[in-house]
Every structure is written in C-alpha cells, then in structure tokens.
C-alpha cells in the first residue's frame, strides 16, 4: 500500500513499456526513467507476463531481474470480485472492457496507484474515474 506523504505509485501498462523499449518516444523514455529513479513504478502480473513473453529469449533473464526490482501489486480474490462488479457496471452502460484491462485498472485503484497507459481501451475506465490516469510532465 501507499505510505502517507509519498507520491503515488504508477502502474505502467504494457503499451508504455513497448514504447519505452522501442526508444522512439523521448517523452516516454524520460518520464519512465524519472519514475524508475524515484522508485514509483509498479507492475501487475498480467503486464509482467506480457513483457516477459514479448522479450527475446536472450533478453528474458535480464528483463526479469529488472522487473523484479519494481513494486509488484497483488491481485487477490477481492481484486477479481471488484473487476467483475466493474465489468457488469460498465456493461450496463453499454461499455465493454477487456478482462486484463479491468484487472489492471482495479489493481491500480485498490493500491491508490495511478495508471500510465497509451492504450485507448482504458479511456472509458479513466473517464468514469474507475482509475486515475498518470500524465507525465
């Protein structure tokens, strides 16, 4: 959990990591490097798995070591239950969200973390304030 007086952790979505590793977006590189230096980067299991599976075999070991240095936010039975409730609320409003996106958003919200994503699929979750967005400066 977040300690009082400390800046919020930031769950960094796969879309941001991909942009970071490709090195084509200087704002992403600078912003993520700053968060890493400030020890504010959090990761959730689905993003961790996507990153590891997307890495070249020769890079996986080093990547796992780097990921293991980040804050891993837990997903509990309560997380899954909240994601289910959120999915039903959104569906009642005519909005469909992916299971992984719901889990990422709910895990961030449960831990008082912000979410940094470049994925437009998260826009309804952010707009409805189910999760707070991180906007790099």
Image (cartoon, grey):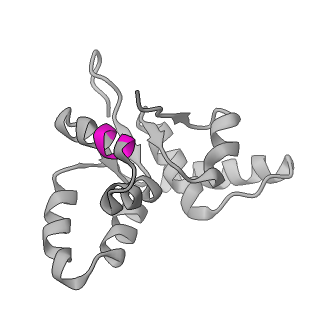
User: Is residue 4 depicted above or below 48 in this figure?
Assistant: above
Judge by depth and name the residue closer to the eye, 115 or 44.
115
Residue 29 percent coordinates (x, y): 31, 46
Residue 76 percent coordinates (x, y): 43, 54
Image quarter in which the N terminus is found:
top left
Is residue 28 covered in magenta? yes
Residue 98 percent coordinates (x, y): 64, 62
Judge by depth and name the residue closer to the eye, 31 or 11.
31
Q: Which residue is drawn at 76% across and 53% down?
A: 88
31 relative position to 122: left or right: left
Residue 50 percent coordinates (x, y): 40, 70
Image quarter in which the C terminus is found:
top left
Residue 51 occupies which quadrant of the picture? bottom left
Residue 46 occupies which quadrant of the picture? bottom left
110 relative position to 54: left or right: right
Q: Residue at x 65, y 55 (%)?
A: 84
Q: Which residue lies furthest to the bottom in this view?
A: 57
Q: Count numbered badges in the picture.
A: 0
Q: Residue at x 13, y 63 (%)?
A: 65
Is residue 133 covered in magenta? no
Q: Which residue is drawn at 41% across and 37% down?
A: 111
Q: Which segment is the magenta one?
A: 27-31
Judge by depth and name the residue closer to the eye, 19 or 128.
19
81 relative position to 30: left or right: right
Judge by depth and name the residue closer to the eye, 53 or 2.
53
User: Is residue 72 depicted above or below 50 in this figure?
Assistant: above
Q: Is the stretch drawn in magenta largely helix, strand or loop?
A: helix
């Amino acid at each position: 959990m977040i300690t009082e007086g400390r800046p919020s952790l930031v769950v960094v979505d796969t879309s941001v990591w991909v942009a970071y590793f490709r090195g084509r977006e200087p704002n992403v590189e600078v912003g993520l490097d700053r968060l890493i230096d400030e020890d504010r980067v959090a990761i959730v299991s689905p993003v961790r798995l996507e990153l590891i599976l997307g890495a070249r075999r020769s890079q996986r070991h080093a990547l796992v070591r780097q990921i293991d240095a980040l804050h891993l936010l837990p997903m509990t039975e309560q997380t899954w239950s909240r994601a289910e409730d959120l999915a039903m609320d959104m569906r009642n409003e005519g909005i469909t969200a992916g299971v992984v996106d719901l889990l990422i958003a709910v895990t961030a919200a449960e831990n008082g973390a912000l979410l940094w994503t470049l994925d437009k699929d998260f826009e309804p979750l952010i707009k409805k304030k189910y999760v707070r967005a991180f906007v790099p400066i």
